[in-house]
Structures are given as C-alpha cells and as structure tokens.
Amino acid sequence: MTDNTIVLVDDDKADQEIIRQALKQSKIESELVILDSGEKFLEFIENKNSPNLILLDLNMPKISGREVLLKLTDQQIKDRIIIILTTSDNENDIKFCYDVGVKSFITKPLDLVSYNLMVENISNYWFNDMLKLPTCV
Amino acid sequence: MPISKFTEQFSGEILNLLLESVANGVFITDIDSNILWVNKAFTEITGYSFKEAVGKNPRILKSEFHDEEFYKEMWETITSGEVWHKDFINKRKNNTHYFQETTITPVKNGKITHYIAIIQDVTAKKHAEKELRNSEELFRTLFYSSPLPTNIINIQNHTVMKANDEWADLLGYDIYDLVGRRLNVEGEIKPWKDQEQLKEILTRLKRGEEVPITEFQIVRKDGTVRDCLFIGRLIEYESEICVLSINVDVTKQRQIKHQLLESESKYRYLFDQMLDGVAIHEVIRDENGKVIDYKYLDTNSAFLKSTGFPKDIIGKTVKEVHPDVEQHWLDIFGQVTNDGEPVRYENTSLGKHWDVVGYKVGKDQFACIARDITEKIKNEKKLKELTRTLQEAYNDLEDFTYIASHDLKEPLRKIKIFSDLLANNTNCEQCKKCNSKKHIKYLNEASSRMINLINDLLEFSRTSRKEILKEEISIQECVSEALKTLDQKVNAKNAKIKICFPKKCKKKMHGDKTLITHVFQNLISNALKFSNKKQPKIEISCEQKNNEYIFVVKDDGIGIEEEYLNKIFDPLKRLHNQDEYPGSGIGLSICKKIIEKHRGRIWAESIVGEGSSFKFTIGEYTK
C-alpha cells in the first residue's frame, strides 16, 4: 500500500462511482480501496493495515459510521486521517464526529464540479510531502 | 195665709226641725259676726260642732286662697244690705280645703241685725267641672295638633263635624271644603275608594261592634290614591252619634315594604336560579370556641341538586348529613367566620370536583358557593390529552418534512452528479448529432431546480420549527448584512440601491438578526430578479405610522398584478416560468413565516410595469 491510499467506506455504489470518477478527473495518483460496510472497515483496521486517509460515510446499514467511530479506540482515531463524507448536515452528527476526533466533516457536494474540487483539496492537503503524520498503532 | 201668719205658726220647733234636716249648712251670726247658731249640716261640712262654732267668728273657716280684697268686697256687699253669693275655698277644722257655695243674707229690721249664711260643699262638683274642662282642652289639643289625620263624622248623615288640617291635607282639600259637608255614602265627595267596605264598617260600628284597624284606600282630590289605615270609634259628639276616626297614611311604608318584598323576591329568585350551589351555614362551637360542626340555614336548589343532599337539610348539621366531614374543613370555615377573610379552594367530595368560595355573611355565619367542576376538569384533561396528541402529530409531521426533504435530496444529488458526468462525456461527434447533450442539459437543470426547491423547503420547515431569538437588533445592520451577501448579484444587475432610514426609525427593535437579515436578503434578491431594467433602482426605507415602523423594499421592476398580491406569500406559489425567472416559490413564504414569528405583518403593493413595494412590520416584544 502506498502512502497515497484512500479508503472509502460507503455502501452506496453510486457514491463509490462518483469518488472513483472524481479521483480520475483530478489526476491524483492514489490507490482507492472501497469497503462497502462498517464491518469490513473494522476488519480492515484489525488486520493492521495503516491507511493514510479514510473517507467514512455515516449512514450505512448494520454498523453505521457512528458505530464504527464508537468501536475504534481513541488512539486509533487520533492516529488516522478520518474524514466523514456524508449527506448529513445534522449538527449533532457534526459535533459527535469532531468530539471523537475525526479530522474533517464534509457534506457530500451536490454537483460534479464541487466533487472534483473537494477531492482535489483533500488530496492536496493530506498528500503533501511536507505534512508529517504519526505512525499508526 | 199671709206669710207672717205662717211664720208665727211654724216658728220655734218646726222651723228648727226644718233647718236641721236640710242638706245645706246654715249658720246665723249677729251684726258683729259672732256665730249664734249652726245646723247639723254645717257640722258635717266644716267639722265644727255646735258648741265649737257658737260664739266664734266665721273666720275660723278662712283659707289662705283668697286675698283681703275678696273679703272686703263680701263685707261691702252684706253691710250694704245686699245678698252675697259666691263659690270659694274654705278650710275645714281638720285643715283640709273644700269648695263652698255660699249665700249670705243680711237680716234687716230697719237696720241689719243678723246675717244668715247658707253653705254647701261643692268640691266634688267643682272637680268634675274641672275634669271636664281639662278633658275637653286635652281633646281639642289632641285633635288639632295631632300629626295624625283625624275627623269626626256624623254616622247618620255623613256630615263632617270636625276635622284637622292633616286630614284635609291627606284628602287634598282645604279644611273649609270639608267641615260641614256630607262625604262618601251620600255625599258629593267620596274619598273612600271602596264604598262597600266603608258601608260594612259603618254598619258594624252602628251595631256597637268594635272595628279593628282596617286598611283602606283614599282617593285624593287630584285623583291620586293613598294607602291608609282606619282606626275608628263610635262617639257622641254635640248630641249626635258620630264616628271619630284616625286615617294614617301608610303609602310610603307600603311602597317601601313592596320594594323590600320585590327586592327580596328578586334576590331569592337569583339565589334559587343560580347554577352554582349556594348554602348558608351557622357554625357550632365547643366551649373553647372551636368549630366542631355547622348547621345549614338556607340552600338553593342547585346546591341540593348537585350535592344530592335531601330537601329537609335546613336545620340539620353537616355531621348529620355528611358524617365523615373532616375537621380540616371545619377549621377552614371557623377561620372564615373568625377573621372574615374569604377562602377559595378546589376539592373532591361526594364523587365530584368542586370549586368552592366560602365567605362570612354574619356573626358565626358563612356562605359557600360550590361549583361542580367535574365536567370542566374532565374536559381539561381531555383537552390536555388532545393538545398532546396534536403536538405529537405536529412534531411527527415536521420530522417527516425534514426527513423526507433530506432523503429526497439524496437521490437527486446523484441524478445531478451523474448528469454532470454524462454531460462531460457527450462531446463525441455522435452525441453532437443526436439530441443527447440537450436532453442531458434539461435533466441536469431540472435536478438543480429540484435540489434548490428541497433546500428551500428544508429551510421553510426549519424556520417553522425554530424558536426565534428576541435580542436587540438594528434593522439597518440587517440591511447592510443582506446587501453584503447580495453584492455579486447587485453588481451583475448593475442595480442602484438607495437606503433611506430617517432618524426616528433608527430605533433598536427586538428580534432575530439572522432571520430579519434573511427577509431583506430575500426581498432585495426578488427586487433584483424581477427587473428587466438596465439599471434597476431599489429603495430600502422605513416609515413610522400609528406607533409602528414599516420597513419597505421598493423596486422599479415588472410589478405584480393585484389579484396575486396576497397569493405570492403562499408556499410554492409562482407567477412566472422557470426560464423567465427561476425560483422555488418558497422565498416569500419563508419571509412571511419569519415576520409572523416576530408578530409583524408583511404585504405587497404594486403597479404592473412600474414596480412593487414589499412592506413589513415587526411587533414589539414585551417581556
């Protein structure tokens, strides 16, 4: 796994496709790992994989994004770049996520241009040589 | 027989016997007033015996009632040979006084030799005369100075024999018109209204019966009627059989009594007809003054009906009809009768809910007004339950609106993004030939509009649910804030914006700054949108009218037809198609909602082709 791996945790096929397209259009070189459930993500973390950037959806069947965050340890959250990418703009959700230590909370854009911009911004910010990150535990 | 012959024949013994047997006292004196002889009657009158009197001067009988002049006149009369006759007061031997009728006759044989005095005790007669005089005087005084109308009428011919002014006043006549006139039965004046009643009374009086005090009516000269009492007795007056009667005018008393009865009956009616139960009680105390029971003095029918207590409750005590009454209540009513402070409470007894007011109505007496509020409480409960259900339904509906809008947005977002993607991919030659690119554009625009619509709906729903802030805000600041966010649009439209706030309108208002800013933003945005001028002019101003401030956003745009002026504030109401003027049709309903939440009004005035004015007020909040 390269340093530029993006893990997308989203059950929605369309959203998966949009991210895929957006990454493609932004010409960012990164590997995209798509996990379509909270369970798979928790499994993924347990296998000591150390992804740099995680885009986590909140509304998922069975184990939701919220529950995922509750199941992770504080340290696990702190060590990773977890960005919430969701349709929700609910204030309680926003507060909860920042409280448990996510790095960012983004409401899914409503058009493609905004999507591309968002992906570019994230990549430019986090996949930067100058940016130093802790080693994941 | 000549008198001298007779005297000679009967002198001596016979004469002596005669003088002794007459009832009048007789005594004879010599010229010097020494008593020579007295008869037995003299002794009976004066108390002096023959032996005691003879040789004495009649001065022994003299009382201190008459002065010297009186005796001098007597002496002058008799010494001149005249007979002296007078009633005067003398004194008996035992010092008691008596009236004496006296005749003194001088005995003359050429000159006066003796005096003969005949005396009689007329004390009793004098007294009787005096009594009569006094009695007459008293009667006259009573009759004429009595404040009670009084009259004497001849029972045979109904002539007024005597009457006082009060009686004349009562009848409304001058007294001279009445006295000597015949009244009633056969007279021209008939003051007694019910003549049959009068005839009956007169018949009874003639029979010598006592007539009790009788009510009757008098018709006065002017036709008005007075209520009177008749008090009459049969008397003999000036040798005629008459009726002495007193007629007491009781009209006023009757009126007062009538009014009192009327008032009493009115309040009684009120009391009986009241829907609230009323009962009046008297407290019963023990030797320490503590209230241990109370007695029912009076109740109205509502009280009996609502409590179900028996009709004969009056006179009974509460412990007799309601044995488990708590001492607590007795203490409360004791307090009411002691300090006079009314109490009001709600309680449950006899299976009902009551709203009771207790207050003092007299010494140791209190009244209770008890309202049966069972039904009211039941209704209140029902109402609470309904309100709760309604609130729940309302909350559910709002949650639903929010969730539905949110969830509707989600698939739309995808339609929009994938149509974006498709649009990017339809640049090939083949696509240019077919209409795919155009179709995708329509799809894309439609989804954009829908997203905007849902966003606005969400905002409308949020505004409805939101509790507005009530802080001090400056409306001018709201306008500046709104213009800041619209800066780009204003520039794009090349609009000229004029803000005109007179000094008196610069007052701080109470409200929610964000929401009021939103209203201005919306109204200014509309003003920009609905204009096809090269340089639209927008004026934002404030005017004061009838103690309220009216804020105005005025444009010179296309205007609104009058019939739509009210409808434009309805949600989703649009007057133009999307191609001309895009929009969701929710903006103004959000403005209306915000202004309503501020207890204000919003309305529009417009002339088609000349422009529109949107005006609103903000109700002042009072804490």
Image (cartoon, grey):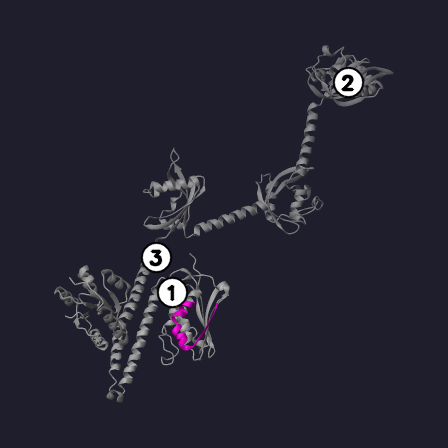
**Between disc 1 and disc 3, whose residue precedes?**
3
Question: Is residue B386 magenta-colored?
Answer: no
Main secondary structure type of the part rendered in magenta: helix
Residue A117 placement (x, y as % from top left): 27, 74
- In the picture of the structure, the residue carrying the numbered disc 3 is B379
Residue B609 placement (x, y as % from top left): 46, 79
Residue B372 placement (x, y as % from top left): 37, 52
- How far apart, in angstroms, are the residues tagged by discs 2 and 1? 142 Å
Q: Amino acid at mark 2?
A: Ala
Residue B462 placement (x, y as % from top left): 33, 66
Instruction: In the displayed orientation, state which residue is furthest to the right.
Output: B110
Confirm whether circles 2 and 1 share one chain: yes
Q: Amino acid at mark 3?
A: Asn
Q: Residue at x 60, y 49 (%)?
A: B194
Question: Which quarter of the picture shows residue B81?
Answer: top right
Mark identifier at residue B117: 2
Image quarter hosting the C terminus of chain B: bottom left
